[in-house]
Image (spheres, rainbow, N blue to C red):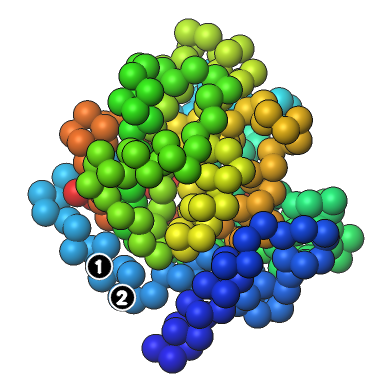
């Protein structure tokens, strides 16, 4: 318990410092120079128990989108699944009991579909969370630090903010920046106060474009601006995200490439959850819930496909 309080105090002091300036003043991490899990340090047993207390009906909500070769993905990424029946081509069977089976091989980028972006995924000028330089830990076979296998189970309170209701649009227009005032207005409308350890998800209606206008889906998106990111980080959240592919306004009005992700992941160790399907949660007005995520432990990967579960 004493260690948890020390970590919380260190995090609060770091967050109070606000936006980092020149490279180097955002590391080492408040959690220690050897830390590799960032904001996940905030997931104390008390945080988990409080989140479990939210379960009233036992209804579960899968939060992932189905992944296939047709799912639009960021730039170079793709997904291909192949079914292989080893030794069974031509009607052959294996063994005296006519045993047969299907086996699948995926040739894919780990960042296609609903995904957990770890804190080793986004850096600033080749420097990543806690001051880790790419030359020291990145190899062709994966990262030697900050890998997704280091991330503990994310079990905490989840909050979904319905931005479609706030803006009065079934699909919030691409390029719409969510300000601190916007977030606070939705929190008030939903009767929610953010607390340390939360996962905060934004519902924008953006998934409705998939298969209808994939170009628009990838060319732009609504999302939080930098001031909103700073405010969210100061609340002590563990992860942010939603139903878009970058979880921030894109293109960014500043002209920078994904500055919010740089700020959240590299500077604050806050995870990004992309392409979260929050439609059922919004239909049920399930604004807060138990959020459960145990990701595949791909050693050396900085991101991975996931299917988080919300329990109400």
Residue for point 36% across, 62% down: 195
**Nearer to me, 97 or 216:** 216
**Numbered mark located on residue 50 in the image:** 1
Few, some or many residues within 10 Å of mark 2 (<14, 14–19, 20+): few
Q: State the residue lying farthest toward the left.
A: 57
Q: Secondary structure at mark 2?
A: helix
- Whether residue 163 is visible, yes or no, is yes
**Nearer to me, 279 or 165:** 165
Q: Quadrant of residue 118?
A: bottom right
**Numbered mark located on residue 132 in the image:** none
Residue 270 placed where, x, y %? Answer: 56, 57
Residue for point 49% across, 34% down: 178
**Nearer to me, 311 or 68:** 311
Q: State the residue lying farthest toward the front.
A: 181
- Whether residue 139 is visible, yes or no, is no
Few, some or many residues within 10 Å of mark 1 (<14, 14–19, 20+): few
Cβ atoms under marks 1 and 2 closer than 8 Å: yes
Q: Secondary structure at mark 1?
A: helix
């Amino acid at each position: 318990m004493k260690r948890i309080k020390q970590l919380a105090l260190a995090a609060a002091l770091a967050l109070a410092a606000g936006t980092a300036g020149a490279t180097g003043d955002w590391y080492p991490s408040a959690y220690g120079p050897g830390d590799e899990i960032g904001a996940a340090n905030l997931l104390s047993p008390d945080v988990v128990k409080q989140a479990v207390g939210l379960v009233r009906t036992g209804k579960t909500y899968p939060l992932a989108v189905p992944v296939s070769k047709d799912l639009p993905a960021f730039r170079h990424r793709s997904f291909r699944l192949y079914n292989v029946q080893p030794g069974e081509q031509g009607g052959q069977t294996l063994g005296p009991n006519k045993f047969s089976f299907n086996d699948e091989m995926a040739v894919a980028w780990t960042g296609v579909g609903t995904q957990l972006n770890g804190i080793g995924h986004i850096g600033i000028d080749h420097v990543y969370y806690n001051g880790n330089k790419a030359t020291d830990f990145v190899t062709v076979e994966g990262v030697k630090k900050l890998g997704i296998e280091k991330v503990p189970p994310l079990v905490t309170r989840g909050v979904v903010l319905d931005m479609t209701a706030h803006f009065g649009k079934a699909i919030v227009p691409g390029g719409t920046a969510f300000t601190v005032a916007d977030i606070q207005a939705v929190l008030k409308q939903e009767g929610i106060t953010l607390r340390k350890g939360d996962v905060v998800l934004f519902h924008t209606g953006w998934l409705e474009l998939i298969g209808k206008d994939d170009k628009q889906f990838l060319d732009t998106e609504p999302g939080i601006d930098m001031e909103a990111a700073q405010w969210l980080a100061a609340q002590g959240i563990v992860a942010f995200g939603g139903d878009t592919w970058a979880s921030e306004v894109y293109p960014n009005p500043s002209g920078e490439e994904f500055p919010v992700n740089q700020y959240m992941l590299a500077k604050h160790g806050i995870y990004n959850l992309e392409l979260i399907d929050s439609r059922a949660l919004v239909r049920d007005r399930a604004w807060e819930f138990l959020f459960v995520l145990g990701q595949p432990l791909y050693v050396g990967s900085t991101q991975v496909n996931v299917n988080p579960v919300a329990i109400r």
